[in-house]
Image: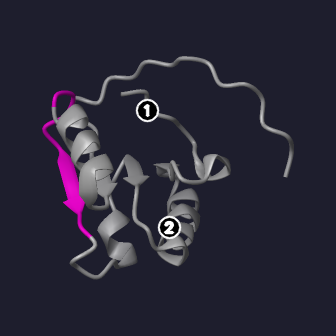
């Protein structure tokens, strides 16, 4: 894998984009609160329901703050395969984008 270049601020319109937040707890709640101001197409996958790859189908952006690293890895690989922008904040190397709340 090539070395990552520095990130730049990039603004995007999420109005018609489907965004999935996977996780529970304060970090997920903060993301949900923040993102709900930018899209009416916000989906939430809590740790209480089993993750399935089909949860990702049709999404434009996925943020996972799940504690299960194996699930996070599967989310990352699946999103990359499907061309979905993904962010796993616990692992910066697994982030296509970063959110600054």
Badge 2 is on which residue? 72
Q: Secondary structure at mark 2?
A: helix
Residue 9 in the image: above or below residue 75: above
Q: Quadrant of the C terminus?
A: top left
The residue under the point 13% across, 38% down is 40
Q: Position of residue 62 (x, y in %)?
A: 39, 51
The residue under the point 54% across, 17% down is 9
Residue 88 in the image: above or below residue 66: above
Residue range (magenta): 37-46
Could you tell me if the residues under marks 2 and 1 are in contact, i.e. CB atoms within 8 Å? no
Badge 1 is on which residue? 99
- Label 2 and label 1: CA atoms lie apart by 17 Å
Q: Position of residue 11 (x, y in %)?
A: 43, 18
The residue under the point 62% across, 46% down is 92
Query: In the current view of this chain or complex, which residue is farthest to the bottom?
Result: 50
- Residue 52's disc is none
Q: Nearer the viewer, residue 45 or 26?
A: 26
> As drawn, is 47 to the left or to the right of 84?
left
Image label count: 2
Residue 81 in the image: above or below residue 88: below
> As drawn, is 77 to the left or to the right of 32?
right
Query: In the current view of this chain or complex, which residue is farthest to the right?
Result: 2
Q: For the residue carrying disc 2, how many other residues have a C-alpha within 10 Å: few (<14), some (14-19), or many (20+)?
A: many
Q: Main secondary structure of the magenta part?
A: loop
Query: In the current view of this chain or complex, which residue is farthest to the front?
Result: 26
Q: For the residue carrying disc 1, how many other residues have a C-alpha within 10 Å: few (<14), some (14-19), or many (20+)?
A: few
Please tell me whether residue 19 belongs to the stretch shown in magenta. no
């Amino acid at each position: 894998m090539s070395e990552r270049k520095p990130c730049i601020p990039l603004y995007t319109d999420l109005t018609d984009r489907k965004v999935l937040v996977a996780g529970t707890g304060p970090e997920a709640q903060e993301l949900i609160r923040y993102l709900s101001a930018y899209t009416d197409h916000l989906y939430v996958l809590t740790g209480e329901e089993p993750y399935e790859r089909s949860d990702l189908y049709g999404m434009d952006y996925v943020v996972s703050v799940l504690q299960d690293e194996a699930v996070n890895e599967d989310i990352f690989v699946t999103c990359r395969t499907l061309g979905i922008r993904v962010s796993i904040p616990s692992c910066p190397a697994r982030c296509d984008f970063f959110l600054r709340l």
